[in-house]
Image (cartoon, coloured by chain):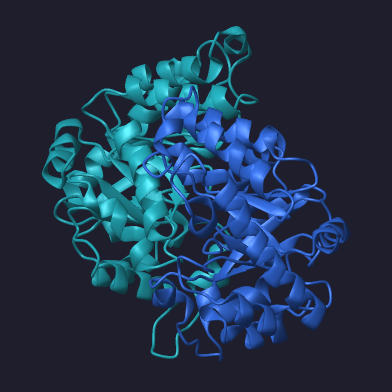
Chain colours: A blue, B cyan
Amino acid sequence: MNKAQLFDQIKAKSSYLCVGLDTDIHKIPEHLKKADDPLFEFNKQIIDATIDYAVAYKPNIAFYEAHGLKGWESLMKTIEYIPNEAFIIADAKRGDIGNTSRMYARAFFEEMNCDAVTVAPYMGEDSVKPFLDFPDKWVILLALTSNAGGKDFQNLQLQSGGEVYEKVLEKSQEWGSDDQMMYVVGATKAQALTNIRKIVPNHFLLVPGVGAQGGSLSEVSEYGMNRECGLLVNSSRGIIYADSTEDFARVAGQEASNIQQEMYNYLEKYC
Amino acid sequence: MNKAQLFDQIKAKSSYLCVGLDTDIHKIPEHLKKADDPLFEFNKQIIDATIDYAVAYKPNIAFYEAHGLKGWESLMKTIEYIPNEAFIIADAKRGDIGNTSRMYARAFFEEMNCDAVTVAPYMGEDSVKPFLDFPDKWVILLALTSNAGGKDFQNLQLQSGGEVYEKVLEKSQEWGSDDQMMYVVGATKAQALTNIRKIVPNHFLLVPGVGAQGGSLSEVSEYGMNRECGLLVNSSRGIIYADSTEDFARVAGQEASNIQQEMYNYLEKYC
């Protein structure tokens, strides 16, 4: 999916919501655990209930990998099930030397037909570029993450000025344009968004951390939005585990709808 | 496998060779491509031919992931096939927020029973620590990688002194001891090893880049070895693709044997 198509979806649904499919066998409703493929059955119902309010889905690959072959089957069925209109992000945090990154790109873009994959920047240019060889596919590069440990290295002050994450934003713009590159910026760092928008005014940002991790949708939207929206805001636990009974999908849909309504207002106001 | 057991293996085989299983369907001998599971069949013969000379095997996860479910099957069969005496490294470059890293740890340590997994440091402490909750399992943290892009961020000068990779070495020692943490240091950076040994005198280093990537085993051994060897030197392409005929396994074994003999001398000299 290209940038114009993504923005079209955002306008059509008045939403920049991404639903995170961090599907944990220990957290899904009891009655689903007897299903043939509980992770897929859960995801299927979550997708059906939220598709009118979400423009993107983000399966968290670790949650499937942890179950070995069976988990990968659930993941692949989930990705196939997601309607074409939605942008699919493999949240995989991959990145390795060139020939290896190319293999990861094949896995997520060819084997699984995802639109985007999250990539860690530590190994630099040749670890990222192979992902950019696939037309209309995206790299979502980690810049400033929402977790406590993010500060350990991302916020180190450089002798040349600025912090490590700012250098990641600057340097990586040489590798690919805002038509193929997005950045992960944690919602718990909303104040940093003003600064980030100075460095990458036109890029989409994937913002996790709203909800369970404590970030504010209001602040993220105020400081992060640009003329083409430029935001995908992810919520995982706050939507998919909003209810743990047989009613879970309806409640998830309701949560997604509530967020979408809030987003509608921010789109009117800031975009 | 714990550190003492690893050192015992190194002494028993007079070797610190790690064989990288970067098994590419386009590079394996023609006659194997008709096999039921060509990747596994190739790996099986490589393992049989090299096990007397190698203390570790390092499947490069991307090469299996690129084939979807079938690739994961080949990977799991390969890991099961590797004899218990060998140290198994999942070269996966994972790392995410805490609950997600825990899932990756389960995948590689419980589902697959690997001894170690390579982890990217960008997300800091809580992305690394969940891997350290598994007794006798190891994190191999990226420090100074062998690829050209490594310099983009790893060699940035910090205002507080030193470079980013040095800070990674320093900071991460607070998270786990040299009984559970190793570091990736590219063989193309042999001169940096003297400096690295000042920061982490007792840790094992996983050194890729010898052979195809141009690193020197002699220099790595001279500057990197400590009293418990402290090195695992990886060779992938130089061994597994040394020959592309039906004779490939014998030639791979010969290459591994040659490296082991060189290692025997360095162990006598420096350890």
User: Residue B24, position in %: x, y?
Assistant: 58, 29
User: Residue A145, position in %: x, y?
Assistant: 51, 70
B83 left or right of A200? left
User: Residue B228, position in %: x, y?
Assistant: 15, 51
Q: Is residue B16 above or below residue B52?
A: below
Q: Residue at x 43, y 43 (%)?
A: A24
Q: Which corner quadrant of the image does residue B115 belong to?
A: top left
Say which of A199 and A5 sits in front.
A5
Q: Is residue B210 visible?
A: no
A190 left or right of A202? left
Q: Which residue is drawn at 36% across and 39% down?
A: B108
Q: Which corner quadrant of the image does residue B53 belong to?
A: top left
Q: Is residue A229 above or below residue A249?
A: below
Q: Residue at x 22, y 53 (%)?
A: B180
User: Residue B17, position in %: x, y?
Assistant: 32, 38
Q: Residue at x 22, y 46 (%)?
A: B134
Marker count (numbered): 0
